Amino acid sequence: MTPGTPEPRRPGSYRVALVCLGNICRSPMAHVVLAAKLADAGLDDRVEVTSAGTGGWHVGNPMDRRAAATLAAAGYDPTHHRAQQWAGTDDLDAQDLVLAMDAQNLADLGGRRDRVRLFRDFDPLEPGGDVPDPYYGGDSGFEEVLAMVERTTAALVAALEERAT
């Protein structure tokens, strides 16, 4: 069963942040896919998506070339992403839902709370798992991440439709 989403902080809009370690692989892939799927569902005017990394090593850089190539091959546009760092409490207070890519990212965000969860809590096949970091592996790791992101995003968009209408 897909979990619900918390109430929006402001009626008529919903803000989702996706968080990984460096904001160059997993969270930007999820950001691009979620934004595209929200647009397809006609929700892009009511649901805002951002992504960030808990570390600041890559701030200002585009996403990893392998992540971008995987997204482009699947028909997504990865060209607008620039890495940013999570700003802590200020970012948390501005979001309706914060989704960490793995358990360590979740811990870095202060742990699970009503508005802070794992991205894959919405995964219909394996809820609550980590999105593995493909950075040190080959191209197949990015393809695996994209498959997880696409199926999880489908369930997430369905949950967001209930909040954004």
Image (spheres, rainbow, N blue to C red):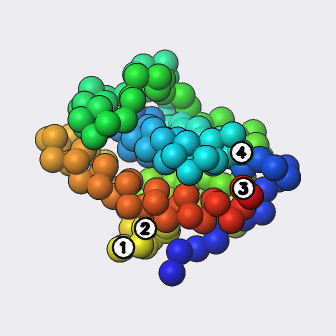
Quick check: marks 1 and 3 in contact, CB under 8 Å? no
- Of circles 3 and 2, the one toward us is 3
Residue 30 located left or right of residue 18: left
Whole-Å distance between the Cαs marked 1 and 3?
25 Å
Q: Callout 1 environment at 10 Å: few (<14), some (14 to 19), or many (20+)?
A: few
Q: Where does residue 120 sit, x and y in percent of width and height? A: 45, 64
Whole-Å distance between the Cαs marked 3 and 2?
20 Å
Residue 124 located left or right of residue 110: left
Secondary structure found at label 2 = loop
Q: Does the rendering let one see residue 162?
A: yes
Locate the C terminus by quadrant: bottom right
Q: Which quadrant of the view contains residue 127?
A: bottom left
Please name the residue that numbered disc 3 is placed on: 164
The numbered mark at residue 123 is 2
Q: What amino acid type is highlighted by mark number 4?
A: Arg
Quick check: marks 2 and 1 in contact, CB under 8 Å? yes
Nearer to us in this view, 104 or 13 = 13
Please name the residue that numbered disc 1 is placed on: 126
Q: What amino acid type is highlighted by mark number 3?
A: Ala
Quick check: marks 3 and 2 in contact, CB under 8 Å? no
Q: Residue at x 54, y 28 (%)?
A: 84
Q: What amino acid type is highlighted by mark number 1?
A: Glu
Quick check: marks 3 and 4 in contact, CB under 8 Å? yes
- Of circles 4 and 2, the one toward us is 4
Whole-Å distance between the Cαs marked 2 and 1?
6 Å
Secondary structure found at label 4 = loop
Whole-Å distance between the Cαs marked 4 and 2?
23 Å
The numbered mark at residue 46 is 4
